[in-house]
Amino acid sequence: MSTPIIIPVTNKADKLRFIKSQWNFYKGDNSFVPPIIMDREKLLDEKKNPFYKHSAIQLFLAEKNGQIIGRIAAIINDNHNIIHNDNIGFFGFFECEDNQETANALFHAAEEWLKSKGKSEIRGPVNPSMNDECGLLIDGFDSPPVILMTYNPKYYEKLVENYGFGKVKDLHAYILDQNTFVSDKMRRTVEIIRQRSQVTIREVDFKNKENFKRDVKTLKEIYNAAWQPNWGFVKMTDEEFDFLAADLKQIADPVYTLIAEVKGKVAGFALAIPDINQSLIHNKSGGILGAAWHLLTKKKKINLLRIIVLGVLPEYQKNGVDAVLYQEIGSRGLPRGIQYGEASWILEDNEPMKKALTTTMHGTIYKTYRMYQKTL
């Protein structure tokens, strides 16, 4: 059996081959949601994506007999290492045939590149950071991924662990059901919180350019402050946040993009997005026109929201503002045909959030994603 050839991606044509090769590994997999090729090109564009102003990436392809049988990215995130006082490199965008030799060759290529840059550990998967898609799916293969969450064949776990990677952290996705989500007790509790703490909710203004810019600034400040203590978290730069906001504006709904205020002062925000993957799963080619068509014709059938971000400023975290935001999202979704919610991702050791999701909102873990690490 011939050894796979590892090819560093050095030009635009090979980068497109890298992106399109993802389809090679999901033939016949009904849970695979094809990415939009144009979105992947933008994400990996080192000139347009501001992430690469403080980071570096090297893509690799594995080939055998002229066929792409695997791919991987080696990533250096300087802001992560500064904030966490680490010397870590990352891997991401991993895809591979069910062959340990191919996987080993890909991981070795990523390791050697990171070692040449002076890194001492490798962690992943991240695509390309913890602020993007991250984690390897290890449990919950019976349903497709929701918007901006990862998906992979089950055998990837074996390939990663057989190479010597060990678990560093699990990330959970909780499923919420409108039938059990908002109980009478929760409604009464939320109403008491609203009155006692004078909590009000408003939508982000998507229509007025200046108001939108103001609200994005507010969201960025809350995001960076509320998540600062979290494992692996790295503050977004102003350019990164604006880059993300411009993308999310295309798919977000102001009905579910909410800012909470306490006595007129900003206290927190929530961002939930209709699971457009329920439409995009039909866009087999990954083309932008096909994506637009399926979103247009199947939008009304979407029955799930992904709660991507829910953050409360530290000084308001004991006021129950989070409960008000969750209840508000649920009540807004029900008349619009939203039956389910996914809260993701949640760190396995985030006890306050886990308690709120399970005890108060009766959510259950239905998917688990694992972050791995290895000494170089």
Image (cartoon, helix red, strand yellow):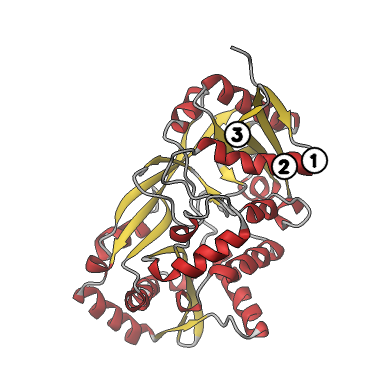
Does 43 sit left or right of 46 as displayed? left
Q: Position of residue 349 (x, y in %)?
A: 39, 49
- Is residue 232 at all visible to an observer of this figure? no
- Give the side of residue 35 with respect to residue 348, left or right: right
Between marks 1 and 2, how big is the CA–CA gap? 6 Å
- Percent position of residue 143, x then y: 36, 49
Look at the numbered disc 2 and give the secondary structure of its residue: helix
| Residue at figure coordinates x 49%, y 38% from the top left | 27
**Residue found 67% across the figure and 32% down from its top:** 61
Q: Earlier in the sequence, mark 1 or mark 3?
A: 1
Give the residue type at disc 1.
Answer: Asn
What residue is shown with label 2?
Answer: 15
- Alpha-carbon span between mark 3 and mark 2: 23 Å
In screen coordinates, is 341 left or right of 14? left
Task: Report if the CB atoms under discs 3 and 2 are less than 8 Å apart.
Answer: no
- Element assignment for label 3: strand
Q: Which residue bears the numbered disc 1?
A: 11
Residue 121 appears left or right of 348: right
Kindly state the secondary structure of the residue where label 1 is placed: loop
- Residue underneath mark 3: 122
Q: Nearer the viewer, mark 3 or mark 2?
A: 2
The disc, 3 or 2, on the residue closer to the chain's N-terminal end is: 2
Is disc 1 in contact with disc 3, using a CB cutoff of under 8 Å? no
- What's the amino acid at mark 3? Ile
Q: To which quarter of the image does residue 299 belong?
A: bottom left
What is the number of the mark on residue 64? none
Q: Residue at x 49, y 81 (%)?
A: 203
In contact (CB < 8 Å): disc 1 and disc 2: yes
367 and 142: which is toward the camera:
142
Mark 2: amino acid: Lys
